[in-house]
Amino acid sequence: MHSRPQISPERAAQLAAEWFEGQLDAPAELDSYADRNFLVRAPDGTKAVLKVPNVELAEDIDLQIAILKWLEARPSAPLVPRVLGPTRTIEDDAGRPTRAWMVGWIEGELWFDASPTPALREELGAALGQLARDLEDFRHPGMERHFAWNLAEANWIAEELHRFEDPARAELVCDALMQFQGRVLPRLAELPTQVIHGDANDKNLAVAEGRLVGVFDFGDACWCPAVCDLAIALAYAAMDLRLGCALPEVAAACAQVCAGYHGRRPLTALELDLLYDLLRARLAVSVTSSTRAREAEPDNAYVSASEQGAWSVLEALGAVGRRAFTATVAEACGLALAPRVPGARTGDELLAARRRRLGPSLSLSYASSGMPLYIRRGEGSWLFDEHDQAFLDCVNNVCHVGHCHPRVVEAGAAQMARLNTNTRYLHEGLVDYAEALCATLPAPLEVVYLVNSGSEANELALRLARDYTGGFDVAVLDAAYHGNTGNLVDMSPYKFDAPGGRGRREWVHVLPTPDPYRGAHGDDGPAYAAALDAADAAARGRGSRLAALFCESVLGCAGQVVPASGFLAAAYARARAAGAVCIADEVQVGFGRVGDGMWAFEAEGVVPDILTLGKPIGNGHPLGAVVTTRAIAEALGGGRMEFFCTFGGNPVSAAVGAAVLAVIEDEGLVANARDTGSWLRGAFEQLAADPVLGRGIGEVRGRGLFIGVELVEDRSTKRPDAARASAIVAHARARGVLLSTDGPARNVIKIKPPICFADVEARILASTLARALSATMR
Ligand code: PMP
């Protein structure tokens, strides 16, 4: 990983002689992570440090030297070493080109060996605050460095989560990463940024007679939010083993450093708010780096020197919690904490009020495990609870391009401030949106009706189908759900066959789910489609005819089932032969979720007669659409009945819908659904292949970011394991990852996150699922 230069002590003596006149003793080597440093004694008794950088980083010393020279000229007299003489280009003992330079020695003991007092910690904070002020205007061509210790880029640790064998440790790192990714990253650009020291650890600080006398080793200096320097220093100040990492002491030690810092460079409210997460991110980087380095270099003790301390602080901080930590720091700095939103109720109060005032048939996620969520804001793939704790949303297929996407919010707000009427007036936005939607669709899907929900879209599709064909009956797939109106509940086996359902109506004909995993015909799609003939016969047998085949292009409530090969093509052909129209319900799977195109039907080689849309279409704004052929669109009420939907197609909805389409296009989200989805399926398949963890996984399936993991008690009997599926969902919830279950037996873990789901987020999900599988093993 690192190419530490090879320099023998004799060679170091020779090199040092180029800086000092006279014969030098062989110098003593100092500890270093990646470089070679030697303590040199000049003939006149003065001490200095000969530094030979890591071969690959030889260029980076220019930045360090420029910083030290800049600081030397500051009136505040920063506690940094002086640069001695010129830099020399050399070869190390292995003949590799590198450079050597010399700095003055600061007399004192390392912080690591000292006994820090509260006053000393405050002094450290003050020195770092002063350093931040002194470096505020410093610029250098080499300052933008991308490397593992740049705290702004800490989320590389997502790729290393698999290295932690102990689940408790994996959880600590994963949680730190989640809060960094969810809370910190979106705010980074708002933080004041400058060149920072980047590594004020306990071996880069010198103490003499109880005072801080030196801050050295600028080898990790980089362009970074200023507060990161403080967070990094806290990681080590809290690690002081004499604290024993007892909870209050850890927060108090951090607060002492912060108070000193704040005295010199006042912390902003945002810096204070993010400090805890930045500190934990640094500790997570540290333990990840040590774990990785130990595997690569088992003999280099320095690489994992602080590992135990870092784990202890990470654990202690987890127990302290963000609120208590931040309150301690705020008090020490004399800062006010952000006040609670006036009038906001606690989660318990809300739950009680909800029970009093809202319909009891509404469900509340995680209520049965006693952990209902009180979500206060959303951003990207993240939701934040009343304590602003970040939760990874892996199941929300409505906020499709990311929660509260700024372009969508802006488009809706701007239009709402200008005009909101209905489709009885000419409006450019309405027509533009219908055109933009049709541009994503194949002919002859060219006419749009806008409504407010998926249910309204399916209800209108049913009317259109009946009016166009003259038939009345419908064919649906077993376990399907198409909406909440009276007709649609009657058409949804997921509802009418479930508790409280009224059973099947005679005009509804149910086809077996074309489920390659459980179905009677395996992956033979046309064999399942043959059931349409029986449906047609049954309809005619009761003096009716089939008006429509309603079918999702990938089956959602049935358990994230990709229909058996060739099913859709064969089913559409038979439905049409029976005189019915084919209705693709893409309320769940449309708008690029499947990754290989905008619409899930495309890859099946079919074009529906009517397409119904909802959920993702408005990114959370209530919107639905029916897109169909001109002939079908004109058939409503024999072409004589007006269709009016008060809110459907209003200018605000049209603006929101257009913004969603533009974001999908501009941010390349279909390709993201394909790539992130295929990485995730690969990761889940790897879990399924694991002889231990994979035992209960019957199947991993899906397309793009529409994925199902089916749990079974036994792979040979395929007996559904709903209890384990819900235990996994509860386990993940407690660790900040939101999932749910579906399928007729509720044994399928449903994964359908916003399609902006990032690589790091996918890795967090995979790691959490692995731990949940392990924790729920029987
Ligand atoms: N069709 C499908 C496939 C759905 O999943 C849903 C909602 N779960 C609907 C229709 C109904 O949509 P809405 O809840 O917006 O009425």
Image (cartoon, grey):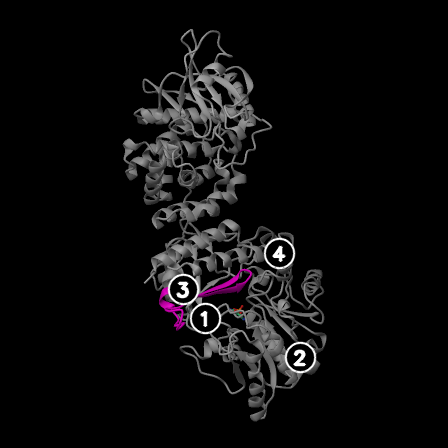
Would you say the residues marked 2 and 1 are in contact, meaning their CB atoms lie under 8 Å apart? Answer: no
Q: Amino acid at mark 4?
A: Ile
Whether the residue carrying mark 3 lies under 8 Å from ligand 1 is answered with no
Query: Quick one: label 4, few (<14), some, or many (20+) residues within 10 Å?
Result: many
Q: Residue at x 32, y 36 (%)?
A: 250
Determine the secondary structure under disc 2.
helix
Label whose residue precedes the other's in the sequence (2 or 1): 2
Tell me the mark number nearer the camera, choosing from 2 and 1: 1
Residue 722 position, x and y percent, is: 38, 68
Q: Residue at x 39, y 24 (%)?
A: 205
Tell me the mark number nearer the camera, choosing from 1 and 4: 1
Query: Quick one: label 3, few (<14), some, or many (20+) residues within 10 Å?
Result: few
Which mark, residue 636? 2
Q: Which residue is mark 1?
A: 743
- Quarter of the image for residue 360 reads bottom left
Which mark, residue 364? 3
Which mark, residue 657? none
Determine if the magenta segment contains residue 700: yes
Which corner quadrant holds the C terminus? Answer: bottom left
> In the rendered view, would you say 396 is above or below 68?
below
Q: Which residue is mark 4?
A: 664
Can the viewer see residue 650?
Answer: yes
Q: Amino acid at mark 2?
A: Leu
Determine the secondary structure under disc 3.
loop
Span highlighted in magenta in the image: 698-725
Determine the secondary structure under disc 1.
loop
